[in-house]
Image (cartoon, helix red, strand yellow):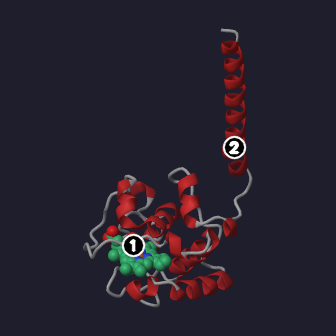
Amino acid sequence: MRSVPVINVVATCAFLIAAISLGEAWGGPRSAPVDFTKISPTDLVHRTPKGGLQNPYKDTQADIVAQGETLFRSHPCSGCHGGGAGGGMCPPLTKSDWIYGGDDDTLFRLVTLGSDQLQKNGYTRMGFAPVVGPMPPMGPLIENSDDLWKILAFIRSRYDDDPAYKYGAPASQQ
Ligand code: HEC
């Protein structure tokens, strides 16, 4: 009988320690700036709440765009979307009819997870782009999140449609 309270104390301590270390694991890295070169696209997607992903690069940074272009061409992207991202057997990435949305967060998640998983996460097709087929998940093939942000900066730099739709439908139309 006397051992019961001891077990309770031990259990309570274990619980508190677990709760404190979990709190550190969750609270710590989020408040510190993320080093995109050290986190895979898949991990970044899973730890960032919907809407929270934003490209640290601008498509006016010529050196970043050049690196993004090399990465785009060294991954399977160009085989489907064409070397200049203007479309091949799959949709162009330079036009205003974004399939799930044109913002950084949606594009990062689509490329990482692929279109089937994106839809399971609650994203729906919009726009009038014809259905060609699913986009496969590319996250596991891209070394780190920094590389994917550079690829997306390159894609933005190739945009050649109505400027109002560069990042998706303007707020007034959503
Ligand atoms: C096997 C072919 C294939 C490969 C490889 C591929 N994609 Fe795609 N991609 C697609 C298809 C198909 C769609 C349209 C998906 C849909 O309609 O659900 C798409 C959609 C997209 C879109 C959204 C376009 C829009 O108008 O909304 C982006 C951005 C994109 N891909 C980027 C990439 C990048 C970057 C890579 C390489 C890391 C890549 N894709 C590799 C087939 C591919």
| Dot 2 and dot 1 residues touching (CB under 8 Å) | no
Helix, strand or loop at label 1? It is loop
Residue wearing tag 2: 27
Work out whether residue 150 or residue 7 is closer to the camera in this orientation and state it.
7
Q: Residues within 10 Å of mark 2 (few under 14, many from 20)?
A: few
Q: Position of residue 171 (x, y in %)?
A: 44, 56
Query: Which image quarter is the N terminus in?
Result: top right
Residue 153: which quarter of the image? bottom right
Q: Residues within 10 Å of mark 1 (few under 14, many from 20)?
A: some
Q: Is residue 170 above or below residue 75?
A: above
Q: For disc 1, does the CB lie below 8 Å from ligand 1? A: yes
Q: Is residue 40 above or below residue 31?
A: below
Q: Position of residue 50 (x, y in %)?
A: 50, 52
107 to the left or right of 98: right
Q: Residue at x 54, y 63 (%)?
A: 42
Exactly how many numbered labels are in the figure? 2
68 to the left or right of 102: right
Residue 168: which quarter of the image? bottom left
Residue wearing tag 1: 136
Q: Position of residue 136 (x, y in %)?
A: 39, 72
Q: Residue at x 66, y 44 (%)?
A: 26
Helix, strand or loop at label 2? It is helix
Q: Residue at x 57, y 60 (%)?
A: 43
Query: Which image quarter is the C terminus in?
Result: bottom left
Q: Residue at x 27, y 69 (%)?
A: 128
Quadrant position of ligand 1: bottom left
Residue type, mark 2 in image: Gly
Residue type, mark 1 in image: Pro
Work out whether residue 143 or residue 72 is closer to the camera in this orientation and state it.
143
6 to the left or right of 142: right
Residue 59 seen in render: yes
